[in-house]
Structure formats: C-alpha cells, structure tokens
Amino acid sequence: MYGYGGYGFFFDPTYILVLIGILLTVLASSRMNSTFSKYVRVPSSTGLTGCEVARRILEANGIYDVTVQPIPGNLTDHYDPVHKTLGLSEPIYNSSSVAAIGVAAHECGHAIQDNRDYMPLRVRSAMVPLVNIGSNVSWPMILIGLLIAQSGLYFGYRMMSIGIVCFGLAVLFQLVTLPVELDASRRALKQLGETGILPPTEKGAVRRVLSAAAMTYVASAAASLLQLLRLLILFGGRRNRD
Ligand SMILES: [Zn+2]
C-alpha cells in the first residue's frame, strides 16, 4: 500500500505529476534564459536605455508619481504599487538592447495597470499578506499532519486539510498572477508601438522576449496546479480507505 506510508508519500505513482511540473518549469526557464541572453546582445535602433523607455511611457500615459530607479541583481525588475517605484535591474536600466526595452515596457505595463485600477492587479495585491502566511505554513502543516495522522489521531487529517487549503490559496495566487502578467506585456507592446519608441521591425523580437517571460509564469502555475492535484488524489484516497 502506498499513499502516505513513510517514503511512499514522496515516491508514489502520483509523483509523476510533480515530475511533469518540474519538467515544464525547467523547459520554460531555459527557454527564457536563452531568449533573454540572445536579445540582451541585440541593440535596439531606438538607442534609448531601459530607464529612458520607462520614463517616456509613463509620461505618455500621464503618470508622474512613479519613480524609475536602478536596483541591483539580474531579472530583479519589478513594479511596486505601494511605494510607486519602478525598479529596473542595473543591466536593464542602462542598456538599450531589445531585451531591456521589452522588460522596461513590461514594468510600465504594471504601473499603467495600477494607475487605471486594473482589477486583477488589485485582487493580486490584496491576496499577498494571506498568501505569504499560507505558503509558509502549508507544507509544515501537511507533513506534521501526516505524522499525527499516522499515529492514529484524526486531528492529523484536519491539519492536513488546512495545509492543503493553504497550498490551494498559493496556487490561486499564481493563477491570478497570469492575467496580470499577460496584460502587462500586452500593454507594453501597445505602448512601444503607440509612442513610436519601437520601430515595427523590432516588435517581433520584443514580443519573443515577453512571451518567453510569460511562459515561466504559465509553467510555474501549471506545476503548482499539478502539485495540488497530487495532494488531492493522495488525500482523497486515504480518506476513502478509512
Ligand atoms: Zn510582470
């Protein structure tokens, strides 16, 4: 009998779902890395740096309360709606590569979402505190609950159920993240076109960079969904046997 029994929990047949998730994540991130490292070396004919592109797009949209600033690290670029800061990693901030322009425009897409009260962004931000707690406690609760359940106490199953609900919350968060990310990239391409920053000949390259980045979000959401499915299969199976 497999299922929750000892090592069986980690190596039962449903583990294939976890492996598929890992494979999807690895494929998406390696595609992202190869696309990014290719286009980070392709200079854009605009000659503008990531920082200049971000400032132009924000200005074109009447957004004057957002600060564009350089931040250390690679691929650490993000928009912070609380502090109204658009952080671009140093290589993006100072570069005029096709990749840099794409990333800078994408982060502007988030700033525009914030400015225009884009609902999925609001939902996502509201979920953050709850998801932070949920994702920290989910696995400890599932594993400790499992040990308690194995010693014959029903309380263990309760604890596991709560752990799985917490994990489900983190999965839901990843699903809400998807429209936010895809919409930011859509806005980025639209802005680059409308503002005349990017010549139409370079649009395809920026699109490839942004889609590769989007695929990493899709893959990690799919991996989490598979993981959740596995927990539900294992949990349901055990409950039926009792
Ligand atoms: Zn984004």
Image (tube, rainbow, N blue to C red):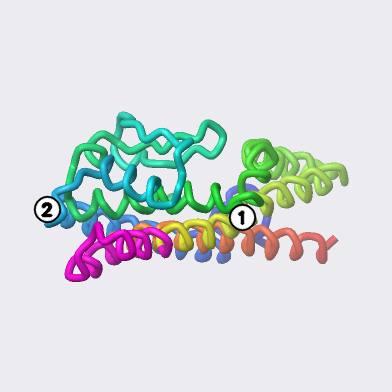
Say which amino acid is labelled 1. Answer: Val
Q: Position of residue 184 (x, y in %)?
A: 45, 57
Secondary structure, mark 1, is helix
Residue 62 in the figure: left or right of residue 54: right
Front residue of 191 and 148: 191
Q: Can you tell me whether the CB of the residue at mark 2 lies under 8 Å from the nearest atom of ligand 1?
A: no
Nearer to us: label 1 or label 2: 2
Q: Can you tell me whether the CB of the residue at mark 1 lies under 8 Å from the nearest atom of ligand 1?
A: no
State whether residue 7 is above or below residue 93.
Answer: below
The mark tally for this picture is 2
Residue 219 in the figure: left or right of residue 189: right
Q: Which residue is mark 2?
A: 43
The C terminus - image quarter: bottom right
Q: Position of residue 110 (x, y in %)?
A: 47, 50
Residue at far right of view: 154
Is any atom of residue 113 visible in this view?
yes
Magenta segment: does it hold 90? Answer: no
Q: In the rendered structure, which disc, 1 or 2, sits on the residue that comes first in sequence?
A: 2
Is any atom of residue 8 visible in this view?
no
Instruction: Please report the residue visible at 21 percent of the width from the left and 70 percent of the height from the top.
Output: 200
Q: Which mark is residue 94?
A: none
Badge 2: residue crowd in 10 Å (few <14, some 14–19, many ≥20): some
Q: Which residue is mark 1?
A: 171
Instruction: Please report the residue visible at 55 percent of the width from the left and 48 percent of the height from the top.
Output: 114
| Magenta-highlighted residues | 186-208
Instruction: Please report the residue visible at 46 percent of the width from the left and 44 percent of the height from the top.
Output: 63
Magenta segment: does it hold 187? Answer: yes
Secondary structure, mark 2, is loop
Badge 1: residue crowd in 10 Å (few <14, some 14–19, many ≥20): many
State whether residue 73 is above or below residue 43.
Answer: above
